[in-house]
Image (spheres, coloured by chain):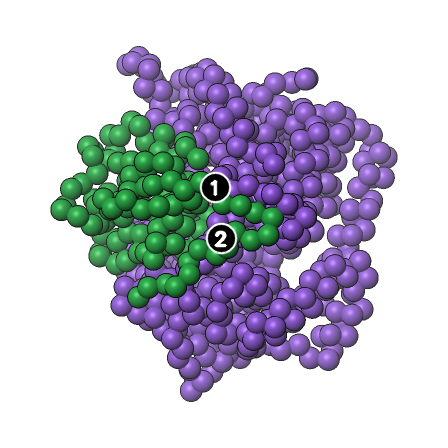
Amino acid sequence: MAGSYLDPDLLVVGGGPAGISAALAASAAGMHVLLADERPTLGGQIYKQPGPGFTVTDPAAMDRQFRYGRSLIESLQDTDVSVRLRTSVVAVEGRQAVLVTEGSTATTVTAQRMVLAPGAHDRPVAFPGWTLPGVITAGGLQTLAKTQRVLPGRRMLFAGSGPVALAFPAQLGHYGAHIVAALEAGPAPRPADLLGIARAARGNTALLRDAARYRSLLLRHRIPLRYGRIVVRAEGDGRVERVVHAAVDADWRVVPGTEQSVDVDVLCLGYGFVPSLELMRLVGCAFDYQEDLGGHVVHRDEWHRTTVDGVYAAGDGAGVEGSFVAIDEGRVAGLAAAMDAGAMSADEAVAAAAPARHRLARRRALNVATSRLYRVGPGIFELSTDDTVVCRCEGVRGRDLAPAIEATDDVNVVKAYTRAGMGPCQGKNCQRQVAALIARRHGRPVADIAPATPRMPVRPVPISALADHSIESPTLFVAGDAGSGTGSGTGSGTGSDTGDDTESEGPGEP
Amino acid sequence: MTVERPRLPAGPGLERGPVVTITVDGRPTPAYLGESVAAALMADGELTLRTTADGEPRGLFCGMGVCFDCLVIVDGVPGTRACVTWVREGMDVARQDGPGHRLAGTGVGAEGDADADADGPDRASGG
């Protein structure tokens, strides 16, 4: 195999649909590809496979997302792509990336090019009571149901928006959850919306068929779908027991006098997803702002090149548009990397990318047709009060933030004053809310409020992964060659050990 | 409040792993290989996985390793994410109070000083 684990032609970060697809395209062009993913199995969040320990006895009986994921993962196994699971990329600088495999020390990899396909996580929405046990994101609850076959709680309320507001309650109902209602923040479709969707149906029939199937599942499980309502607070002693929801206007602002209370023991939140930006920010990519794609979205050209030479971005991590788009974007990014590396000619790359581009254009036509229905309203970020914990990690409440926000419009300064965003999640759950509070106080569009400056490591790692305890040199931390030297030296040995270990638990097993 | 049926049938085409016994707050608790620590505790009827330094209860939130709200003590290592740590035979799990004390029991803290625990990275290597 050309190249080596530590010196790949292409490093792909993320083993979901975009990352796998990019790795396949680049590998087929002859590049040596290293793919790293944090999870113990490939497939990302969308194609998540049952946890290691479960045995799939009949793949044909599993759901479609499982089978899509399985076939994508299997096509990767026919290549010489090196896969490292349970491996986080915690820093990127220039051509170098620092990888930490669970239970091992850090490894520094020098990659000529990188495709960043880190995926997305649930859009956090802060409201009174959102920290109570039993308030769980749609992604979290789906993982429990799909990969662990566990469903906590008897009576659930779903609140969210967009395609997931149909899909998730339907899937959870299918698994046997008792869902008292599914709340969609957006408006009910009008005939004009349906006409627009029908016009954009070409090439999107699978998606629309899914939507129709989810709608009929909701009916079959008698889950009422209520449009134009959001959760305004969750209440309970030690866990969620009641949820108060209310009608909203077109900007998702609560209409006074419309509050209703419902007793539940689980509240499932699915207000869409936001991209994982930290590596793209760390490496210095430029960003645009599109709330409906997740807020700050990396700027790319038509080949999914970012503004940083040799760095490409694909999938939900580059703007949340779902798994079908991710597969095609990954392919375009992989082909672009191969073309830019000289592994294929521009003509070959253009021809190979054409079908994927065609599908992407059709998908975007559908997204335009549904934009009125699925537009994220600013009112959703106006629910937190003085007493609401905004930063879950550090326990920072609205009243703690207020003086800092009064004094500055800089997220970094608010972070330094209050610790909001300094905890282990690195601001993923509070930064959007802090930005919204700043924007409102200072009368600025939220698009203008830059996220906090990212710091490595972008994932918390044990100090023992970065510092080699077997070296007792007093000059260990002297600036210079200590980091890369010790990192790669110790990492190559332990890394391959762990690699063997994780591969045996991979999805290849029957 | 109890939950009636936290564990679902594995369903057509899928079988659970073998039963293992883990310890939760000192109490032997059955779990299935393939379950996360969070899933095993929630299947046992427990939604509160830790309390914050302010005494607020917290449980599973994101379920995918992003939010760090489901922190528990696993084999003496505090701050371990219950949602991305998989159970194994003999695993000792304690719900966490503040930065690293045991929530239940007789006030026994996590063994040793949490920050100085060099065995930390081994915490989730089973599976």
Q: In the figure, A61 relative to B88: above or below?
A: below
* Residue holding disc 1: B17
Would you place residue B25 above or below residue A380 in this image? above
Q: Position of residue A137 (x, y in %)?
A: 46, 59
Q: Chain of mark 1?
A: B
Q: Position of residue A443 (x, y in %)?
A: 45, 68
Residue in front for this viewpoint, B110 or A115: B110
Question: Quick check: can you spot residue A234?
Answer: yes
Chain identifier, green in the render = B
- For mark 1, give the secondary structure: loop
Q: Quadrant of the N terminus of chain A?
A: top right
Which numbered tag is attached to residue A149?
A: 2
Amino acid marked by disc 2: Arg
Task: Give the side of residue A367 with respect to residue A89, left or right.
Answer: right
Instruction: Say which residue appears at 14% left-offset and 46% top-offset.
Output: B107
Q: Is residue A279 visible?
A: no
Distance between the Cα atoms at labels 2 and 1? 12 Å
Q: Nearer the viewer, residue A420 or A45?
A: A45
Q: Residue at x 76, y 71 (%)?
A: A196
* Quarter of the C terminus of chain A within the rendering: top right
Tell me the amino acid under the disc marked 1.
Gly
A78 or A110: nearer the eye?
A78
Q: Are marks 2 and 1 on the same chain?
A: no
Query: Is A498 situated left or right of B28 in this image?
Result: right
Q: Which chain is purple?
A: A
Rendering quarter of residue A454: top left
Q: Is residue A200 left or right of residue A374?
A: right
In the image, B24 versus A295, the foreground residue is: B24
Name the residue: 29% across, 27% down.
B118
Residue B92: give x, y in percent of width and height: 29, 39
Question: Crowding near pointer 1: few (<14 within 10 Å), some, many (20+)?
Answer: some
**Dot 2 surroundings within 10 Å: few (below 14), some, or many (20 or more)?**
many
